[in-house]
Amino acid sequence: MKKKIIIHTLGCKVNQYESAAFLCSFQESGCVIAKSGEDADIIVINTCTVTAKAGAQSRQTVRRLMRRHPKAKVVITGCYAQMAAQELAEIVESPVCIIGNGNKHLLVETALQEKPCDLTMLMGRILSKKEICDLPMQRFGDRTRAYIRVQDGCANFCTYCIVPYTRGPSRSVPLNDVLAQTARFEKAGHKEIVITGIHVGMYGKDLEEGHDIADLMVAVCQKHPDIRFRLSSIEPQEITDTLLAAMKSCDNFMPHFHIPLQSGDDDILNRMRRGYDRETFRKVIQKCTKVFPDAAIGIDILTGFPGEGEKEFANSKSLLQEINSTYFHVFPYSKRPGTPAANYKDQVPKAISQQRVAELRQLMEVKKEKFYSRFLNTARPVLVEHKRTKDNMLSGYTDNYIPVVFSGEDKLMGQVIQVSLTKIKDGVVQGLQVEK
């Protein structure tokens, strides 16, 4: 009898990559995914703790899945497991396996062991890890777009962020191993790959090869000219002329940036320990826009950081209004025990943070529609997703990350086709396939 598996993933693209690697290894070992309503033999929960809400969701998910599948072997990993292993051990009603971020390469082997899952804790000292877990896979599930994790860890220690404590120092995947993984994804039929990491701009700094993130992007783009590549979130200081030149030299390097700002106020940026000021950020955006005028630019912004008064928030909002950007990821500040900012005296009330989140999201909708409107009555290359919308339409993303829906046949799924963007209805871009 084949073992039935459930993998539940919370959090970032790196977690999603790792969970896809677990699934691939389980399937290669003869396991199958449990269907909806079926009892599972093994449950893997890949947790997150980047915010208090994410930590609470991780705990709730563990309890819910253990109640639903009382006989399953439960394996908990990810950042919440790394940070709060003892707390997890106390809230569960039966034994579980808790595997730290530095030992994820042992997860499938541990889960498949026949012996009962006593309280097994494979944690290790994440802050002293020197090598990245090796998690190769053949295919990124049934997704059109694959993620590849090329780097893990962060040593920035921003004052609000728990990630360096849960992921450890920066570690990179050697370039040849990255190329081997992109080759496997191409063989599996993926037409777009997102290069991701916890602090992807630090790629290669820990290796003796001498390659950086720009070298990596050129290498993968040149090796796979028929695959579209995107680069996930990268710090503003790491968007160099060299990286922009690399993007310009490769037609399959998509014009799309995701750049964390976090605050548009210099005093708050300094207290966050971000390493740049608002004017530096503005110039980075101007540089990106000058080289790639059609590029989508996404921005991470944090509201309600300790000490953020009306003036500081106004500085953030005004900067976001002024710069060219397409969309924001807006987060309310979340106090994370163990970080310096958790002990700052001037905490902002939750209601004020939530109001500021709502204001910035309203601004984002205006800016997003303005960006989309620029490209109406033009044709863009769109990678068609493998699933239809609820309205039975095809959907996909343009090269510059505009989501678009349109009519078409199933045979277009997984293909890159030209689509004319015709109108925006209820915030959704609609289009028509351009016939060859």
Image (cartoon, grey):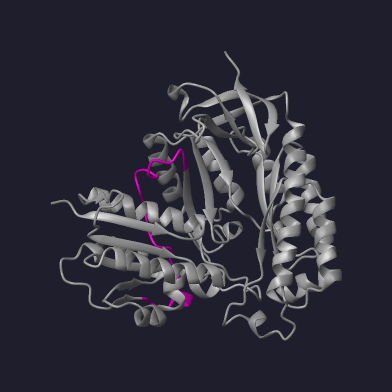
Between 356 and 277, which is closer to the camera in this rendering? Answer: 356
Residue 341, percent from left and from top? 67, 80
Q: Residue at x 19, y 65 (%)?
A: 113
Q: Residue at x 58, y 43 (%)?
A: 230
Residue 200, image quadrant: bottom right
Q: Is residue 33 shown above or below 186? A: below
Q: Is residue 220 shown above or below 169? A: above
Give the prevailing secondary structure in the magenta stretch: loop
Between 237 and 375, which is closer to the camera in this rendering? Answer: 375
Using residue 329 as the reference point, say whether residue 316 is left or right of it: right
Tell me where the magenta segment starts and ends, as one range.
123-145
Can residue 7 be found in the magenta stretch?
Answer: no
| Quadrant showing the C terminus | top right
Q: Residue at x 60, y 23 (%)?
A: 418
How many numbered marks, from 0 up? 0
Using residue 44 as the reference point, say whether residue 301 is left or right of it: right
Q: Is residue 316 shown above or below 390? A: below
| Residue 302 seen in this snapshot | yes
The single residue placed furthest to the top in the displayed view is 436
Residue 30, percent from left and from top? 20, 49
Using residue 382 as the reference point, say whether residue 71 is left or right of it: left
Residue 173, percent from left and from top? 46, 56
Residue 101, image quadrant: bottom left
| Residue 304 seen in this snapshot | no
Residue 367, percent from left and from top? 76, 45
